[in-house]
Amino acid sequence: MSYLPYAVAGWIFLVGLYGIVTSRNLIHLIVCVSVVQSSTYVLLLTIGYKEHGTAPIFKDLPLAESQRAVDPVVQALTLTDIVVGVTVLALLLALALDAHRATGTLDPDELRALKG
Amino acid sequence: MSARARLALFAAGGVGLAFLLAWGFSGLADFGHYPGPYGDVLNRVAVGQRHVTSVVAATVFDYRGFDTLGEEFILFASAAGVALLLREARQRDAVLRDPVADRTVRAVGLLLVGPAVLLGLYVVAFGYLTPGGGFQGGVLLAAGLVLVWAAGSYRAYSRVSPTTVVDLAEGLAAAAFPALGLALLASGGAFLENVLPLGTRGSLLSGGTIPLLNWTAAITVTAAVTLIVAEFLEELAVPLRRPTR
Amino acid sequence: MDWLAPLPVAVPLLAAAALTAFGQFAPPRVDDLTGILAAAASTVFSALLLAEARGDLVVHWFGGWRPNGGVALGISFVVDELGAGLALLAGVLVTASLVFAWRYFDEVGTLFHVLMLLFLAGMVGFVLSGDLFNMFVFFEVMGVSAYALTAYRIEDRSAVQGAINFAVVNSLGAFLLLIGIALLYGRTGALNLAQMGNAVTTASPDGLLVVAFALLATGFLVKAAAVPFHFWLADAYAVAPTTVCVVFAGVMSDLGIYALARIYWTVFSGPFASEAGAVRAVLLGAGILTALVGAAMCFLQRHLKRLLAFAVISHLGVFLSGVALLDPRGLAGAGAYVGAHGLLIGGLFISTGMLRRRAGSVDELALHGRGRALPVLRAVVLAGVVGLTGLPLLGVSLGHSLLAEGAHEAGYPWLPAVVTLAAAIVAGALLRAWARVFLGAGPRQDALLSPEPEEEESVSEEPSSLRLATATVLVAAGLLLPLAPGLPGQLVQAAERFQDRPAYAGAVLDGRPVPAETAVHVQRITLDAAFYGLAALAGGVLIATMALTPARRRLSGLGRRADPLVRGLRAVHSGHVGDYTAWFVFGTAVLGVLLSLGVH
């Protein structure tokens, strides 16, 4: 069972990619990109976990037990990762809006302006 | 390429990728057995070195503060990008058309704005002592402002967050980060070196530059998220110009 | 002098923030000026860093967090000559393009300049960073600004589509980077490149290391547009405004190749040392494939910017091949090539922009003969094309020369011939376009070329002297770059230092100065390289002539046999983001499996 979180991360990654490949709607596609990204959050946080661990907040936790706290670095990395994800999502959605305005459709199959 | 060819290509690649990921992950330590050393070292020394009780905040704003600088500017770039893609394409003279009609919705929503903003401020203020921080609180604050739209109208929202002021706030807060870094560099230290007095552990006045960076991050995030949400909301109120050809 | 290191990144960031805050109150020319000044300042700082990094590494620890007992607590910038050189190139191209864009982007207020400055900061940060996650952060700064800049002409449906393809595929590449970073962090507990390298130096290449390298390499190769991750580049470069294309084509994609080299030499060269031959073979294969596919697609284009985009892809394949040799001369060759190429292609994109403003089109066939009245531009474009192909002693010739030497040392003596073939095809396409536009040669119809939807612009103006001057300066600089005194020797020494892992780790973690290099004698041009360069040029002229004259009918038999290949290539470049993603997944799997088979 100790590999389950890793398997979950891998599954989310692949399922999101499948969603992108088979998507017929740009908004759906963009959300699938977000899904792929969330697999990286799961992976990062899984790596930093300690069994019977607690949060690295030492307000109530005595300093002597500092090694019981889970890894704060992956949490900082995930925080950055989430911000990156949100910003790219916002930009992609704005692009989808522009695409709809310019072509009247959100179907990737219909966006055929760039070929060859 | 036909949809079938695409799917076949993906299937072939997907199987290979699944095996690669499984093989790579198998080399990782078991779940729950983090081997260190980076996290363990920080847990051991951060509170003593910086007098803040949240090691995550110490990591985000001090040890790995330069990453946070980059992250803030990614958000900044996204706000600028969304503005570029949406703001400039609107009909200038369209009529705003979205006030909320239902009085219950309006009442409940407006009542919630206060607590939402207060919660956001709390999360920011104590962010380096307990879970929270500039980014998390900033999003809450922006959400509080969005409640003004949800409970009222876009016009009310844009009065609460006028573009001029938000741009100014965002720019100043974002500028504060590299400016602080450069100032510390000029005074002989390293870029973003934490040289302010460290205060008492566990109190609001602790951490040196950490509270400063915490608040500037909060302002930047609030401003950027407000800008981004405003651009999308304006879509409902003011439709984009139809293309001329 | 390590305080110099943060400056090329911090100054543009500060300027961008200040522009956002105050630009709305200032008169319009202030944005243009601020942008140019900030970019120029960054360029100057990068140049100073390059001088400082001569013979040594400049290491700056942010926040003053020096490493403790080999464990890095903070983030560092580690500046070596090749990285500083790329930062300088980025600064030069952004400054030049902002000068070129004087008054051009007024309608959007400060937004364009803000995004360009952020883009510059992202590129410089990416190349100077010594921490793998920090590299990812700057990769995204670079990415987000680039996606927005690409879609600048939002009224144009192909611009929006190009930006979407760009954003989706590059984001997927970034996610692979994250998984690679997570794997390495899980194994070494570090994010600092030097520390990671130390932690795995004696490890055997097990599944985790191989997969981490494969994923990181793929992520960087997406940015570097290696086949089959290259589809987004042609779309994006074809539709982005010229000002932005100059920077994209000149330096952005090269950064992916630099990063690949950096992580290989700093982290993976230890565990993969005995299997270096396999890594070499796989990466070289990718490089050659990219060079040839890029060249073939280049020849099939009539949209000038798309033509140039595929030329860039082909050249990127050559850079990748140089780096893939895992040899100092190969790396030095790639470096020389990148420098000259960046300047020359920048000049060519500016020229294309001028043609568009003057004649309202970038379609090679529609522009037939329209360039006859522009003698200066005609000369500049010809000089650029010739410089890109390999005129001995000028332009990319130094790159070719060093690459050929590296290929011989690494045991791939046939590589220069393949590179020459790709260069000849690209030259053929470029010369064909030049002749058609500036000489009015050849027929006005050509069934071989892609039927592209036209983007008309109703502006018609004389090429401004400022723009013409910028193009001329860039092309001249690109041509003359190899003549810089001492450059070949310095490049090879820089490459040798780049590949010296223990020295890097010692300098970063212990502050030990890098050991002095023995002087190395490098010829500016060898006889073989001169021969290959001239052969590429001759081949290009031959191909262009055949494309433009009735002699083509004799080749139509050959053409008919190649038709399924052409149709296949065209069908695959569909513009559909789902297709690109499928190729991305497939390519990642293939690259990963090949590396696993070779290294494990």
Image: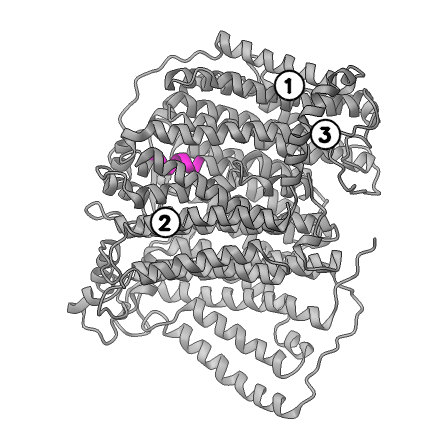
Q: Hey, which quadrant is residue C405 in on the image?
A: top left
Residue at horizontal 23 percent and vertical 68 percent from the top: A53
The kind of residue tagged 2 is Ile
Secondary element type, mark 2: helix
With C74 as the anchor, is C346 left or right in this view?
right
Secondary element type, mark 3: helix
Q: Nearer the viewer, mark 2 or mark 3?
A: 2
Residue at horizontal 50 percent and vertical 74 percent from the top: B141
Write down the residue under mark 3. Answer: C468
Is there CB contact under 8 Å for labels 3 and 1? no
The kind of residue tagged 3 is Leu
Asked if residue C259 is among those painted magenta in the image, a careful observer would answer yes
In whole angstroms, how far apart are the C-alphas of marks 1 and 2? 41 Å
In whole angstroms, how far apart are the C-alphas of marks 3 and 1? 18 Å
In whole angstroms, how far apart are the C-alphas of marks 2 and 3? 45 Å
Q: Main secondary structure of the magenta part?
A: helix
Q: Nearer the viewer, mark 1 or mark 2?
A: 2
- Which comes sooner in the sequence, label 1 or label 2? 2
With C8 as the anchor, is C2 left or right in this view?
left
Write down the residue under mark 1. Answer: C386
- Which comes sooner in the sequence, label 3 or label 1? 1
Is there CB contact under 8 Å for labels 1 and 2? no
The chain identifier of the residue carrying mark 2 reads C
Q: Considering only vertical position in the picture, is C191 above or below B102?
A: above
Write down the residue under mark 2. Answer: C181
